[in-house]
Image (cartoon, rainbow, N blue to C red):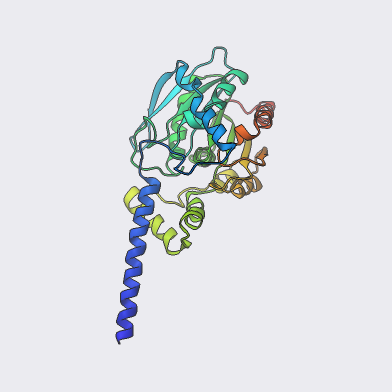
Amino acid sequence: MIFFYVALAVLLVLILASLVITCMLCSVATKRKSSFSWGNVEPPEPIRTYQRRIENATWLTETPSERVSVVSRDGLKLSARYYPRENAKRAFLLVHGYRSSGEHDFAESAEWIYRNLDASLLVIDQRSHGQSEGKYICFGVKERYDLLRWHAFLLKKAEGVPVYWMGVSMGSATVLMGLNADGTPKGLSGVIADCGYTSAKEEFRYLLKKDYHLPPFPFLFLSNLYCRVFEKWRLDGASTLDAVKANADVPILFIHGAADTFVPYDFSVQNDRVCKAPHTFFTAKEAVHALSWYYENDAYTDALRDHLRLCEEKNVRP
């Protein structure tokens, strides 16, 4: 009998500890923070060099833009900056990643796209980032519907030219999930998905093991339950794999650094394998997370040009 009570007490302690750990993890992972940080560990070269380039890039902040907004389907005011280009040939909707910003994730690429691809730009603040409202980051599950609001806005702003979605990291997952958020979006010419995961659930699973050395059970189950109860979304609420499978028309360019340890390279491989639409895959062999643009810039820009050529030869236009 004593053994039973001891075992029961141990079990209750383990359950309580699991609940406390889960609440702490989810709070850190999903609640809004005021700024993005690379962390306190000094990264090796060449990452430090690329980070300095990102910090010193000023085109997005110095170039005149129009601050614009839309309202999400759950009532949040979402903010973005619109950079119109005279006689634009196309328009890009740029979607940043987790706890990041357009200034960071498109620090250099935005200017290159604007000048070399003759594109107007819509650089959004995802919900719970920048000047957009929101309390929780939902890893693309709710953000995919925000993307559709921005897409409708951009179609009107840049009427008559091809429209492209380009996302980095969580932004990559967002643009892929957006492909079937409400059926295939009308007027979308192509997608560029740089270093995205397949679902919030699978990214949580990976980071639980890598960063916290915790098993999927019970922590993945409890994390999903926490998000459902307190934040009104689910880790398994959307999958890029499902969205990519459902898309047969909009061409996709997948990009991923083979040395990525934050979002594994294999996630993009999985997306590529199930893709039914015209698609290509660019691998930056030495690149870590979200830095493929810097590691292999010439090959990256060549891949972008080739992708646009593929999209526009297929006449996937608004």
Q: Quadrant of the N terminus?
A: bottom left
**Could you say which is closer to the camera, residue 120 or residue 52?**
52
Can you tell which quarter of the image residue 35 is in?
top left
Q: Farthest residue toward the bottom?
A: 1
In the picture shown, does residue 229 fall above or below 65? below
Coordinates of residue 145 in the picture (x, y in percent): 44, 38
Coordinates of residue 146 in the picture (x, y in percent): 43, 35
Is residue 151 among the parts visible in the rendering?
Answer: no
In the figure, is residue 72 to the left or right of 110?
left
The residue located at (39%, 59%) in the rendering is: 222
Is residue 67 among the parts visible in the rendering?
Answer: yes
**Could you say which is closer to the camera, residue 194 or residue 46?**
46
Q: Give the number of marks.
A: 0
Coordinates of residue 34 in the picture (x, y in percent): 35, 36
Q: Farthest residue toward the top?
A: 86
The residue located at (50%, 58%) in the rendering is: 209
Q: Quadrant of the C terminus?
A: top right
Coordinates of residue 132 in the picture (x, y in percent): 37, 32
The residue located at (44%, 31%) in the rendering is: 149
